[in-house]
Amino acid sequence: MDFKEINALSIKELFISQIEEMILSGELKPGDRLPSERELADKMNISKTIVHDGIRELSRIGFLDVVSRKGVYVADYTSTGNLDTL
């Protein structure tokens, strides 16, 4: 018998994928402000830690700008993105 490996995405990966999809589809546009981490966690029924880690990863790859004490904004990834953005 030949069993294949089962790969399931983590909740964090699903969160990142959903936000990326919203940005790439134009639903979220550069400059748009995201709700707070707490609001996103409540709306998506996930933990605030997952949201925080996902936002940090999306910022690292160039999709989001985190402005201390002001909020999280969609970055203009076409001009500020890096190789990870691709």
Image: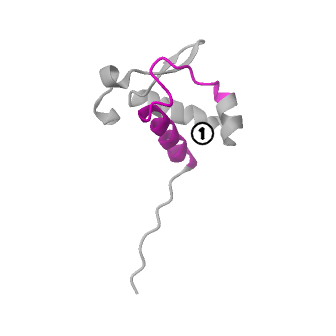
As rendered, which of 5 and 20 lies closer to the eye?
20
> Which residue matches tag 1?
50
* Identity, as a three-letter code, of the amino acid under mark 1: Ile
**Magenta-colored stretch includes residue 1:** no
Quadrant occupied by the N terminus: bottom left
Expressed as whole percent of the image width and height from the top left, the position of residue 57 reads: 46, 33
Residue under the point 53% across and 46% down: 14
Expressed as whole percent of the image width and height from the top left, the position of residue 56 reads: 50, 30
**Magenta-colored stretch includes residue 13:** yes
Name the secondary structure under disc 1: helix
Instruction: Judge left or right: residue 36 versus residue 79.
Output: right
Residue under the point 39% across and 21% down: 76
Crowd tier of the residue under label 1, counting other residues whose Cα lies within 10 Å: few below 14, some 14–19, many 20 or above: some
Residue under the point 42% across and 28% down: 63
Depicted 48 relative to depicted 34: above or below? below
Asked which quadrant contains residue 5, the reply is bottom left
Expressed as whole percent of the image width and height from the top left, the position of residue 53 reads: 54, 35
Q: In the displayed orientation, state which residue is furthest to the front.
A: 26
Depicted 3 relative to depicted 52: above or below? below
Q: In the displayed orientation, state which residue is furthest to the bottom.
A: 1
Quadrant occupied by the C terminus: top left
Residue under the point 46% across and 62% down: 7
Instruction: Judge left or right: residue 79 versus residue 29.
Output: left
The boundaries of the magenta stretch are 11-38
Q: In the displayed orientation, state which residue is furthest to the left.
A: 83
Instruction: Give the total of numbered labels.
Output: 1
Expressed as whole percent of the image width and height from the top left, the position of residue 17 reads: 48, 43
Depicted 53 relative to depicted 7: above or below? above
